[in-house]
Image (tube, grey):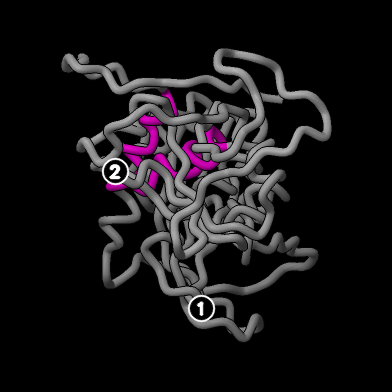
Amino acid sequence: MGLFDIFKKKTTPHVNNENQLETTLRKAATEAAYRPEFYKKLLSEKLVVLTTKAMLNNGPQTLEKDTNVNIYSFHDGIIPVFTSTEKIFDKGVIKEEVSFLEMKGEDLFNLAKGATFIINPYSDYGKELLPNEIESMLSGTILTDNHKKIVVEKETKVQLGQPANYPKDIVSSLKILFSNKPTVKKAYLGWIFNPSSGEPPHYIFALDIEGETQSITNEAGFTAKQFLNTEDIIDFIQIDNKSGISDYFVNETNPFYQR
């Protein structure tokens, strides 16, 4: 399941050699568009935790089934977790040799369900992970919490236009997200009000996507919600060239993103 080892802090400076997870964490700290990718990598990449009282020999070894391991936690119960062994020694907070366990993120979070983690606590970029956040990652709903899919089965009259307040932060992040999604051809912004829905007017984004759409709209919805209040509504639709709402975007507006 994982590897044990002893690592000693290097006495000479090392060049910046971020792994993929560290690069994504750094970007996600300031840019919402990278947060969906960060959550995915957090489960699939190797993470490092400190251990105490491990009755094992030094050096790499495979952890046998039913082996007891004591994972180190701070006095408040929060478990520090690192994206690499080098990050353990950032800022010189830890100066001595330490025992550690390295394992895939998904395995670690399943092993310590209900715990709160803090990623790279001594580094410039880190993140606290709360139990409900971890549970959403493990269940695969982290990007779709509070999302619902609506199928319009009959002709419905709606009011369409452009928002009075242009959501420049949302648009900026979506541009970054879509630039890393080759199947997104164009993206449009609008303002919609459906009197029969009982919902207030809100933003609507129309996406012209080749092939599978759900994973991209999930990531786009998650990214946009980073800038909105919990109760705010936002819609995403697929441009289908079947008249109706699609016609408005294609014929009366300009895309804010184009591949």
Give percent across and percent down for residue 46.
55, 26
Whole-percent x, y for residue 21 in the image: 44, 29
Q: Measuring from the top left, give residue 30's x and y in whole percent.
A: 27, 47
In the structure shown, which secondary structural element does the residue marked by tag 1 occupy?
loop
**Residue at mark 1:** 231
Image-based side of 20 in relation to 13, left or right = right
Disc 2 residue type (three-letter)? Tyr
Task: Sort mark 2 into few (<14), some (14-19) or many (20+) by Cα contacts within 10 Å.
Answer: some
Indicate yes or no whether the magenta region holds residue 24: yes
Neighbor class of circle 1 (other Cα within 10 Å; few <14, some 14-19, many 20+) is: few
Residue, x 28% and y 72% (percent of image)?
164
Q: Are marks 2 and 1 in contact (CB under 8 Å)?
A: no
Task: Tell me the magenta residue range.
Answer: 20-42
Which tag is nearer the camera, tag 2 or tag 1? 2
Residue where numbered disc 2 is placed: 122
For the point 62% across and 29% down, which residue is it? 104
Q: Quadrant of the N terminus?
A: top right
Classify residue 61 by image quadrant. Answer: top right
Q: Does the magenta stretch mainly form a helix, a strand or a loop? A: helix
